[in-house]
Amino acid sequence: MARKRRGRPVNGWVVLDKPAGMSSAQAVARVRHVFDAAKAGHGGTLDPEATGVLPVALGEATKTVSWVMDGRKSYRFTVRWGEARATDDGEGAIIATSDVRPGRADILAVLSRFTGTIEQVPPDFSAIKVDGQRAYRLARAEVAVDLAPRRVVVERLELAEMPDADHAVFEVVCGKGTYMRSLARDMAVALGTVGHVARLRRTACGPFSEEQSISLDKLGSLGHSAPPSGCLLAVETALDDIPALALNAAQADHLKHGRPVRVAGPGGLRFVDIGNLADGAMLCAMADGRPVALARFEQGEIRPVRVLNI
């Protein structure tokens, strides 16, 4: 007999302001406990010492996680010049030092080298798998890690402030898989010094921003004084960048049972108004104001990709 899943069928997104000193998995577990949710996941890992936007998916929202993980991210981070660390952040041991401290003009001059599509070697202490093992596990065991460079996209990189000679604060908008620790490390080398990320905050992740976020303390207090569901965003919030398509009840039932919906019939009769959708386009199928499925328009049909049971 299958084991019964514990918890309630809660569906939606919580935009958590993750505190420092907690892993993303621990933060998700805390949110799941507050809602007594049967199922939970997150839309993009944050390092334990990083803070900021951690979108937590509950229930059927977990089926839309990939759209958030693939989306644009925004960060604000502080580089500490003159110290290289094993982890490329403040948690690791110091492995190199330098007396060189770059000036504002020097920093501004190298920013263009780290904007656009660039190649970046991930930190040794990362979750990337090497021969089936996480790189950070190998690094902790002092096993040499040789990570290949990867292409990432940095849309915007700006120097925000320089509080003192040892520190500089940057703001970044980037694509999937971009490591701020690698960016700090590589900028430091380009400036003739060494450096690491001393502070890191994610300010946006996909369609979610820090203005929407709530702290664990606040979320926990709501759970005792008022229903926390007021902090729950709709499942389809994660799909803001793909078109929504309204279907009738019969068409929705087809998708829910894994069957495609034909767009047109004999004589040019239109069953569904798809507007300007191109072949291969993804869409969010809706019925009665609720999402029915993530679907793809292909060869004159709307084909279900992930059915949403809401």
Image (spheres, grey):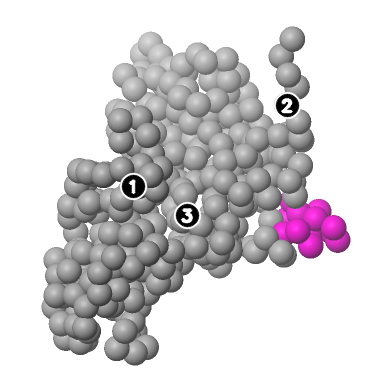
Q: Is residue 196 magenta?
A: no
User: Magenta segment, which residues?
Assistant: 219-230
Q: How many marks?
A: 3
Q: Is residue 224 magenta?
A: yes
Graded by Cα atoms within 10 Å as few (under 14), some (14 to 19) or many (20 or more), the crowding at tag 2 reads few
Mark 1 and mark 3: Cα distance apart in space: 23 Å
Give the image quarter of residue 3. Answer: top right
The reply, left or right, for residue 129 in relation to residue 243 is: left
Are circles 1 and 3 on residues that touch, CB within 8 Å? no
Amino acid of disc 1 = Glu
Amino acid of disc 3 = Leu
Q: Tell me what residue is drawn at x 34 percent, y 22 percent.
A: 298
Residue on which the image places disc 1: 142
Q: Position of residue 141 (x, y in %)?
A: 38, 44
Give residue 5's mark: 2
Give residue 46's mark: 3
* Above or below: residue 303 compared with residue 186: above
The reply, left or right, for residue 307 in relation to residue 170 is: right
Residue lying furthest bottom in this view?
164
The reply, left or right, for residue 85 in relation to residue 287 is: left
For the residue pair 187 and 96, the one nearer the viewer reads as: 96
Secondary structure, mark 1, is loop
Amino acid of disc 2 = Arg
